[in-house]
Image: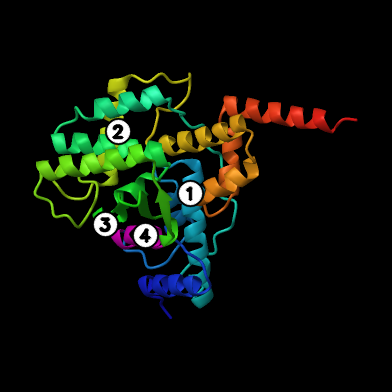
């Protein structure tokens, strides 16, 4: 009995989602894998096919391991329906622990310089968009994809709020600083003067007047970083858009330590504000900055001294 791998994929994803799994990247990864099999006229899954798919050039080790685990679980499902349609793929073919990249922690002056240089990008609409985009990520710690997905009605200037849809469709409401409200309102006015875009629809517009996309934003940001000539540590990777989120989180915790605030309570609030599903991802920021680690160490030392008889 042959197995229709496309139909099996649909059944597999539906079954797992019905059990509560989100599977955010699984659908397109499995579809891409099956596209490759189809291009080679293959009708079954082998270990060699899965390994070749997972280790495609330009893919990092952690992502290779994730791609492999995605295909391994799917192959196991297909094997259960027909052993001839898929080989069982053993675990551990691509071992990879999760290693966090050291973030680039921008200073306030660097962020200001990035925004200034961004305005010079051509065409002008893209320039003002990238400047406002950088400013919003720096001021709120939003994910780039969350900002790109904003619609005009998500910005509520009269209430200083922003409706955000994050990972897995989770929604949250962010309070905005008055300066951020002013900056976003100004961007909206400038944008309206540059393009006849309707009031409704995407908030951030790209060069063509349509919604800004991730590829354009990343490419424009790399140009801005090059123009600013930001210093990097030897062996460190270049600054990224996502590092604006890290800088916001680290600076928030530094302020909490300097104020003598309850850091656990601040981390809980920050986890909600950032849209973290797991608070462990927020506690990681305590180790992301030498200054923050020093502040944590000083507070621990003071606490221990205060408890001594």
Q: Determine the secondary structure under disc 4.
A: helix
- Give the image location of residue 265, x and y in percent: 62, 46
Residue at horizontal 33 percent and vertical 47 percent from the top: 147
Q: Marks 4/1: CA distance?
A: 29 Å
Q: Is residue 8 above or below residue 105?
A: below
Q: Which residues are magenta?
A: 26-39
Q: How many C-alpha atoms fall within 10 Å of the one at disc 3: few (<14), some, or many (≥20)? A: some
Q: Nearer the viewer, mark 2 or mark 1?
A: 1
Between the residue at mark 3 and the residue at mark 1, the CA separation in whole angstroms equals 20 Å
Which label sits on residue 80? none
Task: Tell me the quarter of the image containing the C terminus.
Answer: top right
Q: Earlier in the sequence, mark 3 or mark 1?
A: 3
Residue bearing the label numbered 4: 28
Residue that label 3 marks? 153
Q: Is residue 116 left or right of residue 82?
A: left
Mark 3 against mark 4, which lies toward the viewer? 3
The alpha-carbon separation of the residues under discs 4 and 2 comes to: 27 Å
As drawn, the residue found furthest toward the bottom would be 1
Q: Are marks 2 and 1 in contact (CB under 8 Å)?
A: no
> Where is mark 1, residue-wise?
273
Q: Which of marks 1 and 4 precedes in the sequence?
A: 4
Q: Which one is nearer the viewer's eye here, 269 or 217? A: 269
**Quick one: quadrant of the N terminus?**
bottom left
Q: Are marks 3 and 4 in contact (CB under 8 Å)?
A: no
Return the disc, 2 or 1, that comes first in the chain's sequence: 2
């Amino acid at each position: 009995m042959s197995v229709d791998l496309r139909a099996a994929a649909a059944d597999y994803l539906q079954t797992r989602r019905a059990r509560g799994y989100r599977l955010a990247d699984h659908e397109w990864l499995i579809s891409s894998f099956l596209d490759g099999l189809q291009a080679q006229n293959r009708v079954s899954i082998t270990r060699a096919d899965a390994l070749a798919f997972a280790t495609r050039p330009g893919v990092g080790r952690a992502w290779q391991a994730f791609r492999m685990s995605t295909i391994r679980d799917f192959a196991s499902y297909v094997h259960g329906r027909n052993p001839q349609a898929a080989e069982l793929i053993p675990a551990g073919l691509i071992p990879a622990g999760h290693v966090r990249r050291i973030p680039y922690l921008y200073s306030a002056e660097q962020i200001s310089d990035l925004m200034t240089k961004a305005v010079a990008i051509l065409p002008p609409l893209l320039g003002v968009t990238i400047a406002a985009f950088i400013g919003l990520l720096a001021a709120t710690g939003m994910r780039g994809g969350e900002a790109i997905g904003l619609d005009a009605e998500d910005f509520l200037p009269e209430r200083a709020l922003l409706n955000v849809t994050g990972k897995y469709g989770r929604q949250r409401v962010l309070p905005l600083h008055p300066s951020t409200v002013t900056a976003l309102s100004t961007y909206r006015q400038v944008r309206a003067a540059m393009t006849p875009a309707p009031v409704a629809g995407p908030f951030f517009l790209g060069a063509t007047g349509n919604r800004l996309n991730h590829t354009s934003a990343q490419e424009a940001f790399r140009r801005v970083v090059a123009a600013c000539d930001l210093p990097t540590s030897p062996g460190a990777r270049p600054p990224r858009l996502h590092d604006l989120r890290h800088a916001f989180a680290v600076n928030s915790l530094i302020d909490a330590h300097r104020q003598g605030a309850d850091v656990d309570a601040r981390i809980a609030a920050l986890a909600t504000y950032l849209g973290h599903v797991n608070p462990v991802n927020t506690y990681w920021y305590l180790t992301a900055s030498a200054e923050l680690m020093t502040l944590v160490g000083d507070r621990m030392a003071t606490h221990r001294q205060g408890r001594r008889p």
